Image: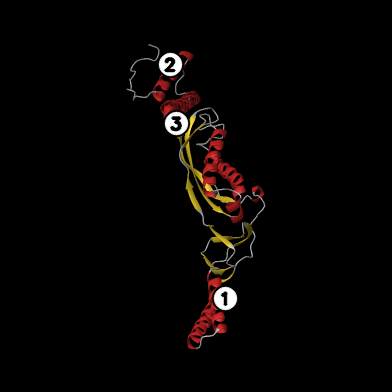
Amino acid sequence: MSAANPIDGNRLPNREVGGVGGNGIVMLFVLLMSMVALGASVLALLAAPGPLKALAAVTLSLAVIFILTGFYSLQPNEAAAVTLFGQYKGTDRTTGLRWTWPWMGKKKISLRANNLISQQIKVNDLRGNPIEIAAQLVWRVTDSAQALFDVDDYRGFVTAQVEVAVRTIGARYPYDDFEHKEVTLRGDHERVSGELRTELIERLAVAGITVDECGFTHLAYAPEIAGAMLRRQQAAAVVAARETLVSGAVGMVEMALAQLSAKDVVVLDDERKAAMVSNLMVVLCGERDTQPVLNTGSLYN
């Protein structure tokens, strides 16, 4: 998977505003005091009814209801976007018991990391070969205002953009290169995953979302050409092995002839050298074990 290095240059300006919401513990203390005062007022009203005592009890009751409706709580890696009659006022990221004016709207959003594995999709690579590809990414919300108010459904937006980015990267490179001269999807996983992450960050910036890491979970030829491509790979492997084998055999024959000549072990004319080279090549390049033949006569008979 690609490393999680922030790419701030591709991000849109941050819309999120902080500094909203109040300390809920303080307001909880105020609520308790109001409830105590309300209880005392009710007892006094029952003991000696009167209009002023009744007005005080009603006022304290409304104050308790007013305070109660302003409470909300935030867990770690959770935020609340605060609005006033549809107008965004700010985001509260402070965890614990919080309080704001009851007429302020509050919409919570998770800031935790999310894992997404895309469905397998069929794409034509750079050479037009159909391949199946799927990706996995870890993403999280960095700007709650953009995620909530700039796109309709930020989770669905992530899913859609992942599919588009995977198609874009899949069509940019060939699946494989038998000559090992090009960047390929199969052979350059780290580089391709890095480009996929860059592509996703650019696409998801409008929603205030960043990608921590991503990579491919499935990468293969489509079933309709998988058999043909497998035979092609096997043929290429056989040819490469044969090339290596012949190159090594030629080197060994050259070394044998050079050492025989240097040490004057035997003097061979061109015809005998050709016969020796032919025999050695058969022995070194043959797929089956060779049976030795002892020559008890002359080389020239």
Q: Which residue is drawn at 53% across and 51% down?
A: 139
Q: Say which residue label 3 marks.
A: 222
Residue 250, above or below 37: above
Q: Which of marks 3 and 2 is in front?
A: 3
Looking at the image, tell me whether mark 1 or mark 2 is earlier in sequence order: 1
The mark nearer the N terminus, 3 or 1, is 1
Label 2: which secondary element: helix
Q: Residue furthest top?
A: 301
**Image quarter (top left, top right, bottom left or bottom right) of the C terminus:** top left
**Residue type for callout 3:** Ala
Camera sees residue 13: yes
The foreground one among 41 and 274 is 41
Labelled disc at residue 275: 2
Q: Position of residue 18 (x, y in %)?
A: 63, 62
Amino acid on which the number 2 mark rests in the picture: Ala
**Eyeballing the image, is 213 above or below 170?**
below
Q: Is residue 143 above or below residue 42?
A: above
Density class for disc 3 (Cα within 10 Å; few <14, some 14-19, many ≥20) is: some
Read off the residue under disc 1: 26
Image coordinates of residue 254 in percent, x first then y, are 49, 24
Residue 226 percent location from the top left of the image: 42, 29
Rounded to the nearest whole Å, what is the CA distance between mark 3 and mark 1? 63 Å
Q: How far apart are marks 1 and 2 (CA)?
A: 103 Å
Q: Which amino acid does label 1 sit on?
A: Val
Is the residue under label 2 in contact with that under label 1 (CB below 8 Å)?
Answer: no
Between circles 3 and 1, the one closer to the viewer is 1
- Residue 1 seen: no
Dot 2 crowding, Cα within 10 Å, few <14, some 14–19, many 20+ = few
